[in-house]
Image (cartoon, helix red, strand yellow):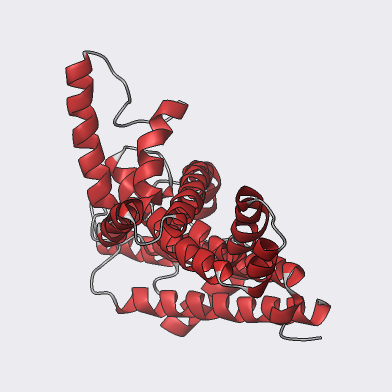
Amino acid sequence: MKKYIFSRVVQGILTVFFIATATFFAMHLVPGDPLMDAKAMTPEIRANLEAKYGLDQPVLVQYSTFMKNMLLGDFGISFTQKNRSVNDIISEHFPVSAVLGVLAILYAALGGILWGALTAKYRNKWPDHVIMVLVILGISVPNFVVAAVSQWATVNLNELAGTSILPVAGWGEFSNMILPAMALGLSTMAYLTRLMRNSMLDVGNSDYIRTAKAKGLKASRIFVQHELRNSVLPLITILGPAIAAITTGGFVVEKIFAIPGLGRYFVQAVQQLDYTVIMGLTVFYGAFLVFMVIAVDVIYGLIDPRIRLAK
């Protein structure tokens, strides 16, 4: 198991290295001037700004500096936000995105298990057909469209009720988290529902299920202790990437619901060509995704030793 964990960690480190390298050179290939919005741009001021941010150095020197600083956990200073480092932006606003992501993944996981089990239980009956149509819609419709439609529907519902049943923007109260969490987790819930349905159908045709039925066990006990319990295991393999995808995929949703997470700063950085913020957040989220994948692989390796790559 130690060799397996070590190999996965090494692969993860190499993956983060390639993410950082690709991000750095991709940003330097993007046309534009990161200092174009600076005021009173005299040659002297521009030279001072370029020296401050290291833009007067050759690209390979900038790359070497970037990688050294990244290894030390320093992503640099924002070009557009005065005297504010990328590390400060991450430490202050990632917890908001993380809370939203956790709520969205809980909603997606619980809903996916429930609806997937129902579709398998009522296979080829009307509940199965209705839920699977909704699953296709959930997978097909982007989360920002769901967010906008849910806001519009909630505004009309509040007007009909004559009171604010749910807020449509802002952050701080649990009620503010409900709509964005649902909008963000809907597509993942739809995918988990489909996966859970297939897993339930496979488990239902297993020999040990037929043996349990032959022994005369109650149908409810077979469903809960054997079918449902064993069908959930395959979902573990995608929970890590799903958590990371939901947490990092909420940029536009955060913008729509005016949530002070990292999404706002990433969108602003792209609009303003803020190199350090874009590269820092991309590498941070890439490393977070890799970490979650490794964590899920290790957990699954503990649960099912057959998937281990090394003895």
**Percent x, y for residue 303?**
74, 67
- Within the image, what quadrant is residue 65 found in? bottom right
Residue drawn at point x = 39 percent, y = 30 percent = 176
Residue drawn at point x = 17 percent, y = 27 percent = 156
Query: Relative to 226, is 5 above or below?
Result: below
- Which residue lies most toward the top here? 162
Residue drawn at point x = 40 percent, y = 62 percent = 278
Residue drawn at point x = 30 percent, y = 57 percent = 129
Q: Is residue 89 left or right of residue 217?
A: left
Viewer-nearest residue: 235 or 56: 235
**Percent x, y for residue 55?**
39, 71
- Within the image, what quadrant is residue 276 found in? bottom left
**Percent x, y for residue 289?**
53, 65
Viewer-nearest residue: 43 or 271: 271
**Does the rendering let one see residue 178?**
yes
**Percent x, y for residue 67?**
56, 74
Q: Is residue 304 left or right of residue 92?
A: right
- Within the image, what quadrant is residue 311 found in? bottom right
Query: Relative to 99, is 33 above or below?
Result: below
Q: Is residue 2 left or right of residue 210?
A: right
**Does the rendering let one see residue 48?**
no
Viewer-nearest residue: 59 or 17: 17
| The N terminus, quarter of image | bottom right
Q: Is residue 168 left or right of residue 241?
A: left
